[in-house]
Image: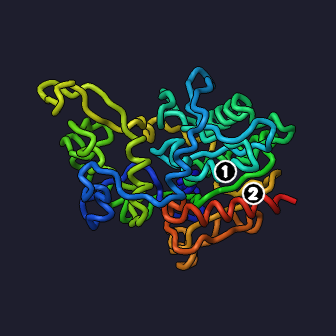
Amino acid sequence: MANDLSKTGSSKETYDDRPFHSEDLPPEVRAPLARYAGAQPPAPAWFDWAIAQEPERGFVTSLGTPIETLTWGERGKPGLLLAHGNSAHADWWSPLGPYLAKDYRVTAMSLAGMGDSGWRDVYRFGDFAEDAEAVARGTGLYDGGRKPIYIGHSFGGGQVFFTAARRPELMHAAILVDTGFGGPPPEVLEERRKRAEIANIPTGDRPSRVYPTLAKALERFRLMPPQPAENDYILDFIARRSLKQVPLPAGETSENGSGLGWSWKFDPNMWEKLDRSDGTFGGQMPALKVPMIHVYGDKSRIIERRASGEPSFLGAQVPEIEIPDSHHHVLIDQPLALVAALRTLLATWPH
């Protein structure tokens, strides 16, 4: 989800990707890793090679907050800055980053409040623009003499869009990956209404839940918004890097006696802390001063909603590229097709 424009009467595309939980989902969507019982699924050679290309890992401080960075490629090459979706982290890009680093200096950042980046009392779209510039400069994306290209998936695409519209001087161009604009669909709103009625009743899948074992935590991992996914090895990779060890609640014990359990890294109050007042553009598509392209999955809710007659918020300003056989999470569904599309696009665009 990008900017919440639903109050302004603008089009509502794709799912809002804030945390959404429902038990009324098939097992392969509700708990895709449960059948592995903590074991790692088998992976193809291309994936094993990619994750073996260990990035430069570090932090850049922005607005007093440490922002996690993963960087591949040589300094002096043109820069690419990668932003992930909501409740995700920089390692979502680890299977793709090495394939983009042949010709680019590539940095994936964990947004504030996610991954190993620091949490904030308030999250703002404008602050992301500051964070992105600090990360791009701190990791050498400007060293080649050209401004970097920003690439963002889902909520990260919304942040990239805001920066392109408000701070175009920071980037050479922008690529959005399955980024929708608008509020959640009716079924998500209904699920939230039901959950609000029992808000004071503890549930097993609250974001702040601490699990006694890594296997139990992995069993609870699911994509937001919910969708089927066939590449379990990618799900397992990102799920393991979505977790951190924390003390177990009083009275609970761990299997190894350490007193530690596992919990999700992202700030569970992210959406309550998000100030979106600077990211709505009054419900109108702003005039863009940098080239922008939108890449989306052909099974995404964006397509479903357009088929029902809803117009695109992006309009004619932003050309689009469709990735076949992919839902919203293109990085998981079709990673190699996305890499091929990005490499071809970057070799020929912008003119």
Please name the residue that numbered disc 2 is placed on: 292
Q: Position of residue 42 (x, y in %)?
A: 38, 58
Quarter of the picture holding the C terminus: bottom right
Q: Which mark is residue 151?
A: 1
Camera-near label (2 vs 1) is 1
Name the residue at 51% across, 74% down.
304
Relative vertical location of residue 69 with respect to residue 171 in this rendering, above or below: above
> What colour scheme governs how the chains and residues are painted in the rendered image of this protein?
rainbow
* Three-letter residue code for mark 2: Met
What SS does tag 2 mark?
strand
Name the residue at 60% across, 45% down.
83
Note whether residue 222 is visible.
Answer: yes
Left or right: where does residue 133 sit relative to residue 53? right
Farthest residue to the left: give it: 251
Name the residue at 27% across, 40% down.
214
In three-dimensional space, the C-alpha distance between marks 2 and 1, rounded to whole angstroms, equals 10 Å
Left or right: where does residue 202 sit relative to residue 280? left
Relative vertical location of residue 67 with respect to residue 192 in this rendering, above or below: above
Residues 157 and 124: in front is 157
